[in-house]
Image (cartoon, rainbow, N blue to C red):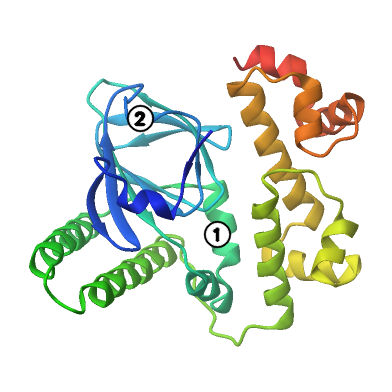
């Protein structure tokens, strides 16, 4: 699986405009773009923006259609499985934002996790005319700054500020579109534990972990972990971890020829039987049957 991370912000030949932590790249079209192999796993935040036509895409095994001027906000660890140009004239731009710790902190401190949960359920949003103009102005400004600032000793600081400005502008657009009001509050211990919990899940790459093992890593009780995760996301720890594991398994079943035993071992199951039980509990069918239906 191809990984898109911070190093791709300066990928030769792929980036159209790059400003350190902010890149506008991969303006591609067609069912199988030569420079873009699927599936792709994002390790940074990104916006998939359809600038012309329509496309059928699959994110984390969920199919959706993206039309002109619509976009999807992609969070780290999301897997883009396919891009299909519906009418033959689709253009898609990916805007990537490297996510330093302070960006995560903003989301936690403003208690925006429930907004992020809403985006998982309703990922497609449409840009207004004014928002399109705003996006174009950011793009032009970054491009002009890159040309003008090459000899400035403060180029890095200026471009980093641009990335920050874009990030906050994006949060503003999302909160308006989703009618959400951020709540300013000092970060609590529970919110810090929740953030560490999400980081641990992301580091696991889908490997199955018990709630007890996760609680031990975070030096808290399972009861406390369950409470803070529920408070911050309206999901239980096991739901978060099982979702991550299922996402990774489904990607392997759909896009690799690994045996069931190899997949089971890769994701921490002691044998194919326990792996099959876990998969059937969540998907309703066996892993083998799922592979046949989705290849």
Q: Mark 1: few, some, or many residues within 10 Å (few <14, many ≥20)? A: some
Q: Height in image: 116 above or below 164?
A: above
User: Disc 1 vs disc 2: Cβ atoms closer than 8 Å?
Assistant: no
Q: Is residue 221 visible?
A: yes
Q: Can you give x and y, in whole percent of width and height, for residue 117 in the image?
A: 59, 56
The quadrant of the image that shows the C terminus is top right
Q: What is the spatial separation of the Cα atoms under label 1 and label 2, in whole angstroms?
A: 23 Å
Residue beneath the point at 56% across and 48% down: 77
Q: Which mark is residue 203?
A: none
Quadrant assignment, res 163 = bottom left
Q: Can you give x and y, in whole percent of width and height, for residue 111 in the image?
A: 58, 74
Quadrant assignment, res 216 = bottom right
Q: Height in image: 2 above or below 140?
A: above
Q: Earlier in the sequence, mark 1 or mark 2?
A: 2
Q: Which mark is residue 55?
A: 2
Q: Can you give x and y, in whole percent of width and height, for residue 83 in the image?
A: 40, 28
With 108 as the anchor, is 47 left or right in this view?
left
Q: Height in image: 183 above or below 258?
A: below
Q: Is residue 285 visible?
A: no
Tell me the element at label 2: strand
Closer to the camera in the image, 244 or 122: 244
With 150 as the anchor, is 59 left or right in this view?
right
Residue beneath the point at 44% across and 66% down: 175
Q: Height in image: 8 above or below 222?
A: above
Q: Mark 2: few, some, or many residues within 10 Å (few <14, many ≥20)? A: many
Closer to the camera in the image, 217 or 193: 217
Q: Find disc 1 in the rendering and name its residue.
A: 116
Residue beneath the point at 47% across and 54% down: 44
Tell me the element at label 1: helix
Closer to the camera in the image, 290 or 233: 290
């Amino acid at each position: 699986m191809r990984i898109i991370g911070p190093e791709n912000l300066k990928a030769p030949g792929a980036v159209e405009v790059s400003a350190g932590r902010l890149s506008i790249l991969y303006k591609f079209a067609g069912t199988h773009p030569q420079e873009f192999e699927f599936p792709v796993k994002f390790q940074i935040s990104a916006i998939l923006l359809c600038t012309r036509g329509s496309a059928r895409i699959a994110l984390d095994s969920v199919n959706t259609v993206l039309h002109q001027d619509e976009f999807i906000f992609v969070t780290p660890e999301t897997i883009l499985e396919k891009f299909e140009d519906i009418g033959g004239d689709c253009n898609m731009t990916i805007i990537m934002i490297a996510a330093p710790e302070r960006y995560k902190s903003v989301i936690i401190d403003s208690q925006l996790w429930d907004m992020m949960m809403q985006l998982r359920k309703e990922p497609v949003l449409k840009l207004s005319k004014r928002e399109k103009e705003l996006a174009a102005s950011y793009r032009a400004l970054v491009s002009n700054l890159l040309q003008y600032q090459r000899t400035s000793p403060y180029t890095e600081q200026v471009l980093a500020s641009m990335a920050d400005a874009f990030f906050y502008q994006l949060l503003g657009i999302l909160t308006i579109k989703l009618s959400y009001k951020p709540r300013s509050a000092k970060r609590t211990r529970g919110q810090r534990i929740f953030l560490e919990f999400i980081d641990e899940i992301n580091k696991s790459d889908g490997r199955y972990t018990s709630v007890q093992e996760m609680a031990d890593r975070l030096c808290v009780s399972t009861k406390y972990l369950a409470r803070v995760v529920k408070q911050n996301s309206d999901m239980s720890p096991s739901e978060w971890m099982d979702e991550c594991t299922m996402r990774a398994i489904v990607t392997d079943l759909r896009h690799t020829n690994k045996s069931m035993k190899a997949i089971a071992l890769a994701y921490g199951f002691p044998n194919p039987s326990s792996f099959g039980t876990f998969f059937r509990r969540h998907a309703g069918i066996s892993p083998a049957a799922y592979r046949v239906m989705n290849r």
